Amino acid sequence: MAKLASGRVTEKSSELLDKFNASLPFDKKLYAEDIKGSVAHATMLHAQGILSESELQAITEGLQKIEQEIENDLFQFEIADEDIHMAIEKRLTDLIGDTGKKLHTARSRNDQVALDFRLYVQKNTLLIKDQLLKLEAVLLEIAKAHTDTMLPGMTHLQHAQPINFAYHMLAYMSMFKRDIERFESAYERNNYSPIGCAALAGTPHPIDREQTARLLGFKAPTVNCLDTVSDRDFALDILYNISVLMTHISRLSEELILWSSSEFGFVSLSDSYSTSSSIMPQKKNPDVPELLRGKTGRVYGNLIALLTVLKGLPLAYNKDMQEDKEGVFDSVETACLSVEILTAALDTMTVNKEKMQEACKIGHLSATDLADYLVQKCGMPFRDAYKITGAIVVEAEKMEVDLSELPFEVIKTLAPCVGEDIKSFLDLRHSMNARTSEGGTATEMTLKQIAWFDKWLDEILSKQQ
Ligand code: ARG
């Protein structure tokens, strides 16, 4: 079968070229977007008097048949067709004859691919956002159950101050909320239709880009066609947004890996989301968070790859741009799967309250409270208070007790100004609940944050219905 577009090039292309040049093996994923775009384009051509009623009908029915063929695995993909756009158009002409050849009026593959790819990115932006909302709901549920569960908050991975587990989960909720907002803003920014831009300069045909934009669910057509056929910012946006999302997922994964080790024992991942070792029968491995952490690398790679492809390109379309799709497909699939499995792993995870609480007794977590007491109650300058607290901590170390368990007399010897009430100040739960400043970890403040996230999630979910 002759090639659909064999204008200037008359000799048959080599098989090697066909293989090298083709995007069909991967862009066939865009078949539904391509058909949707073609139906909208044909509808507009008819409304503008460029296609007759019967031509539009033949084209639409032909395209519908092709969609079914692809969905039922009956479509013959031929590498020589180069890409999904040519493959579908050729099949349309096979099916309906010469009318099929009219579909490409006032259109080029350059605006066609820009449209298909943008539709794919927009659709998946919403999909990832929806999945993130489910993750947020699970995080919120865990938070609600643990507003009083203390664990050692850390800096430098060293015990620092007691915080509650809900507060820790809400930190991740905050990150994923920003991710959701990043996906939302990218959706808005890219919600403009490329179709009708033709090769690069627009078209002399009397087309109506407003109509195709409307039919395809875009806010409006893009403004400048030269930019439109050259622009892959929408692809960079989703790659970047997924990269940031995976950074957050990776950090949470790292904590899950640490927390599920024997050294921490803070959480236990359910058996259905853990794996075993092929040789050590006693082992239960956190493969899920490890893989999530690992997959972050490929997602960064996809972003850097596309940035690099685009950086030296003159306007407008260059074939280099065909390299834009596989990385995006891969990142989107990675993100969807990652968010889904993380949600399930968190939903089924056991939180070991006692272990977390026990761990708070390591590292003199209420040392800052002692220094704060000396400042507030004894009127000491903070640096002096800091020094005396250090000396008291050394005493606790010598006696092998946590500062919260150090006898009053010992404290009194080094800091004569303290009253009996110092003991309650050094109590770990007291330390946590003393942090009542805005955004702090006190249970009271954590509950406030939970109410805030609850309202946000409720509003966003009710808007979607
Ligand atoms: N397969 C091409 C791509 O993915 C479609 C656009 C081709 N346009 C062109 N003028 N060769 O980028």
Image: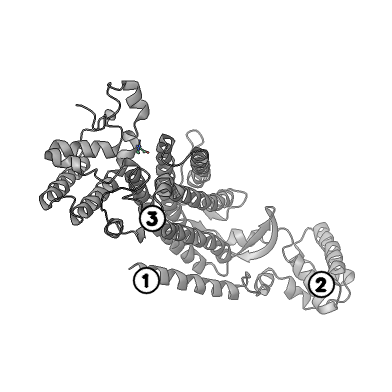
**The residue under label 2 is which amino acid type?**
Phe
The residue where tag 1 is placed is 462
**SS for callout 2:** helix
Image vertical order of residue 360 relative to residue 113, above or below: below
Cα separation, mark 1 vs mark 3, equals: 31 Å
Q: Quadrant of the C terminus?
A: bottom left
The location of residue 370, given as percent across then percent down, is: 78, 70
The location of residue 436, given as percent across then percent down, is: 65, 75
Image vertical order of residue 156 relative to residue 275, above or below: below
Q: Nearer the viewer, residue 231 or 183?
A: 231
User: For mark 2, does the 10 Å Cα neighbourhood hold few (<14), some (14 to 19), or many (20 or more) residues?
Assistant: some
The disc label shown at residue 222, or none = 3
Cα separation, mark 2 vs mark 3, equals: 73 Å
Q: Nearer the viewer, mark 1 or mark 3?
A: 3
Any part of residue 74 in sight:
no
Q: Which residue occupies 30% across, 39% down?
A: 28
The disc label shown at residue 75, or none = none
Cα separation, mark 1 vs mark 2, equals: 55 Å
Left or right of residue 191: residue 295 = right
Q: How is the image coloured?
A: one colour
**The residue under label 3 is which amino acid type?**
Thr
Q: Nearer the viewer, residue 321 or 338?
A: 321
The residue where tag 2 is placed is 408
Q: Nearer the viewer, mark 1 or mark 2?
A: 1
Left or right of residue 405: residue 263 = left
**The residue under label 1 is which amino acid type?**
Ser
